[in-house]
């Protein structure tokens, strides 16, 4: 999970430093890979750690977080873009990514995930082994 956040953070900053439209497109694509990895692992973590009776609400709240992000991005664009340009908008985008990284440092793996790793050790294979 931390790897996904690092990918997202690095390529958010890279977008602000892009020199061509091709670089910007490639950096945005790579940023999306990091964000997608974090979004899916975060959803799994929420669904594994919340109590059964509140799990649906917790996952719904998490999944609606993108709307809050879009609203925050619109506010940042309205304030930053006219004064500092589009690059600054991407560079400011590093802040939420770093906040997420800081939060994730202290989040432990769920009990369900830990139990599944020890219950069937024969199913633990690396990605490299899958594609052999």
Image (cartoon, rainbow, N blue to C red):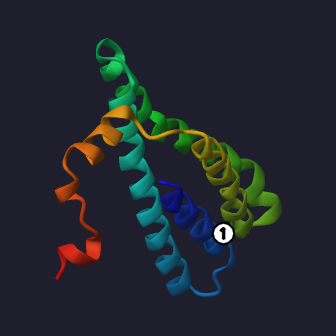
42 on left or right of 104: left
2 left or right of 132 in image: right
Q: Residue at x 27, y 77 (%)?
A: 128
Residue, x 42% and y 43% (percent of image)? Answer: 42
In depth, the one of 97 and 82 nearer the eye is 97
In this view, 104 is above or below 34: above
Q: Is 58 or 32 nearer to us in this picture?
A: 58
View extreme (top): residue:
53
Q: Give how far across and how far down residue 70 sits, in percent.
A: 53, 44
- SS class, disc 1: helix
| Residue 124 x, y percent position in the rendering | 24, 59
Side of 104 where 13 appears, left or right: right
| Residue at x 52%, y 76% (from the top left corner) | 27
Residue ID for mark 1: 13
Image-quadrant location for residue 51: top left
Q: Quadrant of residue 109?
A: top left
Q: Quadrant of residue 56?
A: top left
Compared to 49, does 86 lie above or below? Answer: below
């Amino acid at each position: 999970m931390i790897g996904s956040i690092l990918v997202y953070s690095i390529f958010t900053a890279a977008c602000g430093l892009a020199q061509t439209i091709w670089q910007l497109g490639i950096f945005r694509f790579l940023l999306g890979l990091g964000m997608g990895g974090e979004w899916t692992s975060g959803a799994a973590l929420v669904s594994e750690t919340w109590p059964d009776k509140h799990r649906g609400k917790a996952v719904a709240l998490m999944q609606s977080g993108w709307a809050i992000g879009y609203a925050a991005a619109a506010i940042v664009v309205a304030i930053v873009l006219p004064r500092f340009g589009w690059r600054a908008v991407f560079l400011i985008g590093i802040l939420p990514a770093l906040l997420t990284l800081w939060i994730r440092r202290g989040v432990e793996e769920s009990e369900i995930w830990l139990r599944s790793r020890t219950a069937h050790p024969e199913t633990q294979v690396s990605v490299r082994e899958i594609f052999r």
